[in-house]
Amino acid sequence: MIIKDEGVVLFFIFLPIGYPLIYSWIYNNEVAREVPVVLIDNSHSAKSREFARKYDASPNVSIAYQCRDMAEAKDLIGREKAYGIIYIPHDFDKQLGRHEQAHISVYCDMSYMLTYKAIYQTATSISSEMGSAGVEPLKYEEVPIFNATGGYGNFIIPGVLVLIIQQALLLGVGMIAGTRREDYRYRNLHQEWKITNLLGHSLAYLMIFSIMLAWITIIVPRLFGFVSLVHGIPLFHFLVPYLLACVFFAITVSSFVRYRESVMLIVVFTSLPMLFLCGVSWPLSSISGFWQGISYAFPSTFGVRGFIRMSSMGATLADVQHEYYGLWIQTVVYFLVSCTIYQVRGRYIYK
């Protein structure tokens, strides 16, 4: 059935292979470079020119335009000629000369996170370097840890890669279940709903996705140079319960899919919330207890958190025990639910 169904082959084979390559390739540059910025220099002093020169010398931004007033600069932002404005007031040099705190205003287009980061962090870095009074009262050195490149790829892609496995299983298994329910030939085959058949289906999915999971978690990060601090044996021990939990979770969800196309709506609706609930793209401390409880129902929650800590932070299996045991609990729970469905609901589901 898997081989003969083009849609299932698409979700089981081409999606796990192609999506990681596309996502990783898009974000392979890690950071935005030469972001165009508008400069409004009302000071016209040596210090303001020094700030502008250092700012323009940064690899992340480029002063593409110089304007006389804010209205002209806003027009360039509106036409997407630039993505930020650096405003230097007329008393900038005077305040520095009096050893007072000088101010520089930074306006950013917040619809693009990478450009905002490049514009704002560059201005902050140069301001700290020049100092409000030309002195350095406290010497410090900035050393990024874990995500050493400071790039978006190393930040978000590992979580997306692990989530792809769960969503691909949901799509493929749900499509198989929907097809069987639509096909009248399977309506009275009660023998299809035995525990041995459940184990057979599970093994078929495990055989395929064990290869896909190795491709996504081991090969793809190395192809694109993402941070990968995890070793083979600990990663294997962690991914086994994750894959098992995903398989039985997909089988459980597929029992509620009555039409072939329905599962696509489910996955489209849940993919983005699942990514947020993992605590990767949105801080875990900012997620309410209610939604954190909801997130524990999905294998991706524990899988993404554990994989990122092992891959990006060098955590050992002992360091991710909470996620590890959570995946085994999900495996047992969804296996028992699947067995119940195959025994109780299965013989009536097509009637």
Image (cartoon, grey):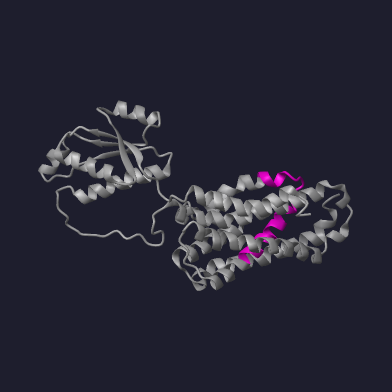
Residue at 43 percent of width and 51 percent of height: 30
Determine if the magenta segment contains residue 250: yes
Residue 176 or residue 345, whichever sits in front: 176
- Image vertical order of residue 159 relative to residue 72, above or below: below
- The residue at the far left in this view is 98
Residue at the (76%, 45%) spot, across then down: 259
Q: Position of residue 142 (x, y in %)?
A: 29, 58
174 to the left or right of 128: right
Seen as rendered, the residue at the extreme front is 223
Based on the picture, tell me whether residue 8 belongs to the magenta stretch: no
**Residue 289 visible in the shown view:** no
In the rendered image, which quarter contains the N terminus? Answer: bottom right
Horizontal and vertical percent position of residue 258: 77, 47
Q: Position of residue 252 (x, y in %)?
A: 71, 57
Q: Residue at x 19, y 39 (%)?
A: 49
Q: Magenta region: which residues? A: 241-265
- Which is the main secondary structure of the residues drawn in magenta? helix
The image position of residue 232, as x and y in percent, is 54, 70
Horizontal placement of 118 versus 45: left or right?
Answer: right
Q: Can residue 250 be seen in this view?
A: yes
Q: Is residue 300 above or below residue 71?
A: below
Q: Residue at x 65, y 60 (%)?
A: 246
**Depth order, front residue of 277/197:** 197
